[in-house]
Image (cartoon, helix red, strand yellow):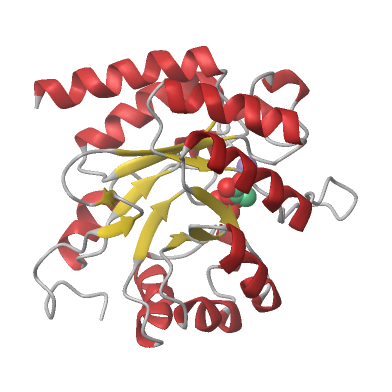
C-alpha cells in the first residue's frame, strides 16, 4: 500500500486547510517538550508570525533515562490546544502507547510516532484505525524497507494519511553530530513510495547551527517539508536545547526557505 507501483500519484495529506506533499514546503516547528503554558503560547505566537504551518511540542516524551523529564502528559496537550486556538496552528505531538489514542484524538491534529516506537506494532495498528494524519519517524536503526513496512501497518488498518519523517540513523558518528542524517532517503522514498516525506534536521544533527544548511539541503533533495525544534531560550530547555533554534534563528531560516522556493 505504501508502494508507488500500485499508487503512482503522490499522496497529499490534508491537515485543516493545509496540504502536505503538494509541492510546497510544509514547516512544523516548536519546542521538543511542552514545558509550561506560557512557554508554548509565547513560542507558538512567534512561530505563526514567522510563517510556520504547524506547531510541534511533546507532552509524552520518550526519554533515554527514566529520571529525565517525561513530559506534562494530558496537561501538556491542553496547553498545546490552547496555543492552537490562539494561533490557528494545527498540533503535531507524539504518543507512545495505544491507550493514549483517545486523549490524542481529542487534542492533536497530527499524531507523531517517534523513532523509538517505529516498530511498536500495537501502536501502529491503533493509529491505523484513525483517519487523522500520522507522522511516522524512521527508527534509530531502521532500514528504509523496515520503515516502509511500519507505514504499511498503518495503511493496512485503513488510515491512508501517513507522512514519513527522516530524523537520522545511528552510525559511527563520533559525538560531533547526534545521529547521521540520511538525506539519500529522500530520493529513495520518492522512488519507492507515494507518501510525503519531511525531514527533522534538529534530531538529525543534534546541533542547532547545523540545522539551517541541512534544512535547505533537504528541500533541494525533494523533501516535502521540515520539522524543526524551536525554543524561546534553548539554553534553558528541559530537553534538546542544543539542537533548538531560537525564534529569531527560525525566522532567518524561514526567509532562506522562501528564497529557495522562489528560486526553484
Ligand atoms: C522528538 O520529536 O522530540 C523526538 C523524541 O524525536 P525522535 O523520536 O525522532 O527521537
Ligand atoms: Mn526532541
Is residue 20 rendered to the left or right of residue 202? Answer: left
Q: If the image is split into quadrants, where does the N terminus sit?
A: bottom left
Quadrant housing residue 242: top right
In front: 241, or 12? 12
Residue 87 in the image: state x and y as whole percent. Answer: 50, 34
Q: Residue at 25% x, 35% y: name it.
A: 219
Q: Residue 184: x and y, percent?
A: 28, 48
Q: Residue at x 54, y 25 (%)?
A: 45
Residue 73 visible:
no
Give the left or right position of residue 217, taking residue 22 as reference: right
Position of 78 with respect to 165 (left or right) is right
Rendering quadrant holding ligand 2 = top right
**In this rendering, would 86 be left or right of 33?**
left
Q: Quadrant of residue 36?
A: top right
Q: Tell me if residue 171 can be seen.
A: yes
* Residue at image location 77% in from the left, 22% down from the top: 236
Extreme residue in the right direction: 67
Q: Nearer the viewer, residue 146 or 235?
A: 235
In this figure, what is the number of numbered marks?
A: 0
Q: Position of residue 146 (x, y in %)?
A: 41, 73
Quarter occupied by the C terminus: top left
Amino acid at each position: 500500500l505504501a508502494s508507488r507501483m500500485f499508487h503512482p500519484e503522490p499522496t497529499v495529506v490534508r491537515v485543516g486547510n493545509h496540504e502536505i506533499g503538494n509541492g510546497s514546503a510544509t514547516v512544523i516547528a516548536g519546542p521538543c517538550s511542552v514545558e509550561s503554558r506560557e512557554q508554548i503560547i509565547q513560542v507558538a505566537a512567534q512561530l505563526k508570525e514567522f510563517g510556520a504551518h504547524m506547531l510541534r511540542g511533546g507532552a509524552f516524551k520518550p526519554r533515554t533515562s527514566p529520571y529525565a523529564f517525561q513530559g506534562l502528559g494530558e496537561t501538556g496537550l491542553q496547553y498545546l490546544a490552547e496555543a492552537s486556538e490562539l494561533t490557528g496552528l494545527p498540533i503535531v505531538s507524539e504518543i507512545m502507547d495505544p491507550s493514549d489514542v483517545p486523549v490524542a484524538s481529542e487534542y492533536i491534529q497530527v499524531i507523531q510516532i517517534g523513532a523509538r516506537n517505529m516498530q511498536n506494532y500495537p501502536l501502529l495498528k491503533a493509529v491505523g484505525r484513525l483517519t487523522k494524519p500520522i507522522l511516522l519517524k524512521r527508527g534509530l536503526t531502521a532500514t528504509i524497507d523496515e520503515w516502509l513496512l511500519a507505514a504499511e501497518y498503518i495503511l493496512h488498518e485503513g488510515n491512508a494519511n501517513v507522512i514519513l519523517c527522516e530524523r537520522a540513523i545511528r552510525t559511527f558518528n563520533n559525538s560531533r553530530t547526534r545521529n547521521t542524517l540520511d538525506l539519500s532517503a529522500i530520493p529513495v522514498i520518492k522512488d519507492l513510495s507515494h507518501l510525503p516525506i519531511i525531514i527533522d534536521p534538529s534530531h538529525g544533527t543534534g546541533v542547532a547551527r547545523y540545522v539551517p544548511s541541512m534544512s535547505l539541503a533537504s528541500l533541494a533533495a525533494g523533501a516535502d517539508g521540515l520539522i524543526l525544534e524551536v525554543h524561546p531560550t534553548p539554553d534553558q530547555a528541559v530537553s534538546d536545547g542544543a539542537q533548538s533554534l531560537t525564534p529569531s534563528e527560525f525566522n532567518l531560516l524561514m526567509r532562506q526557505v522562501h528564497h529557495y522556493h522562489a528560486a526553484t
